[in-house]
Image (cartoon, rainbow, N blue to C red):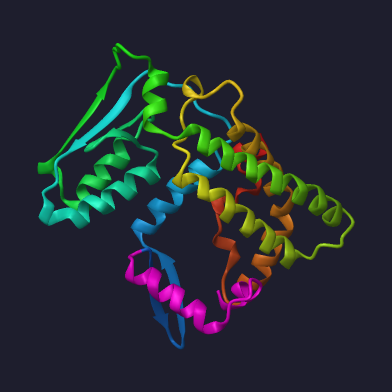
Amino acid sequence: MIQLLKEFGHNDQSVRVAISRMMKLGWVNSEKKGKKSYYYLTPRGVSRIEEAASRIFKLDPHDWDGKWRMLMYTIPEEKRHIRDELRKELLWSGFGSSSNGCWISPNNLEKEVQLLIEKYDISSYVDFFVSEHKGPQTNQSLVDRSWPLKEIEGKYEQFISTYSKKYIISKSTVQSGQMTDAQCFVERTNLVHEYRKFLFTDPGLPKELLPTMWNGNHATLLFGQYYKLLAEPASRFFEDVFRKDNDLSHKDESYDAVDHPMIVK
């Protein structure tokens, strides 16, 4: 970890502090064998990584089943800290809100909602519905009241402007052999880091509820092309560092998204 993160300008101490914080938050755990400590994701960490990956590498908006998921809650003031954390989690999962205590999503998030209810032990304070919107206003009006789509589209436009230029330069330097594997690793990591920020703003609406010309589609296509360009040399650098103290023979097909069906598509 220290060797990998040195490529980003981080020193030993900052890496140890970051790992320590992740352990306190319950994302990572460690196991000591002899003089070495091995770190691994907790079930909570795995769940969050898998949820994030499925959204990051989803290149096309999905079809809508016409149903709305609605979560209503009344959490008492003495549990305000839980209410604040729940709001952050709901935003992360793609829920939107047009009124206090009522959150909606057109996406199939039953599993995520159940995990949140269990995590915060709030079953006595919430109600969850899967229903149809019968008006009198349109579904699009409901979307406009619940999510700032114009603001999100503006952020996608900035991403496209910045990374379309980077992609052209990187494509030339990678193909000419002027970009090292370590540089590809850093660039790919930074690319994913910037793109993942949309998980906090873009709810991942189905295509039926998106504008006809949606910048998110163009940004996603650019991300997929850029990621695929960097994936092989970036993974090669990671493996060169990783194999010194670990066995790569146990990796499975989901280890890297370079051949992920959604990226290849």
Residue 90 figure quarter: top left
Residue at (70% x, 66% y) in the render: 237
Residue 124 figure quarter: top left
Q: Can residue 99 be seen here?
A: yes
Is residue 203 positioned above or below 64 on the image? below
Assign the N terminus to one quadrant of the image.
Answer: bottom right
* Nearer-the-camera pick, 251 or 43: 43
Apparent side of residue 230 relative to residue 132 in the rendered image (left or right): right
Residue at (12% x, 52% y) in the render: 77
* Nearer-the-camera pick, 114 or 254: 114
Assign the C terminus to one quadrant of the image.
Answer: top right
* Nearer-the-camera pick, 234 or 166: 166
Q: Can residue 243 be seen here?
A: no
Q: Position of residue 203 (x, y in %)?
A: 44, 36
- Report the residue that reaches farthest toward the right: 176
Residue at (73% x, 65% y) in the render: 183
Residue 64 figure quarter: top left
Q: Position of residue 199 (x, y in %)?
A: 47, 45
**Number of numbered discs visible in the structure rendering:** 0
Apparent side of residue 191 relative to residue 199 in the rendered image (left or right): right
Is residue 244 positioned above or below 34 on the image? above
Residue 17, magenta (yes or no): yes
Q: Position of residue 134 (x, y in %)?
A: 29, 12
- Report the residue that reaches farthest toward the bottom: 35
Apparent side of residue 159 relative to residue 85 in the rendered image (left or right): right
Boundaries of the magenta span: 1-26
Q: What secondary structure is the stretch in magenta mostly built from?
A: helix
Q: Position of residue 59 (x, y in %)?
A: 59, 35
Residue at (14% x, 55% y) in the render: 79
Residue 105, magenta (yes or no): no
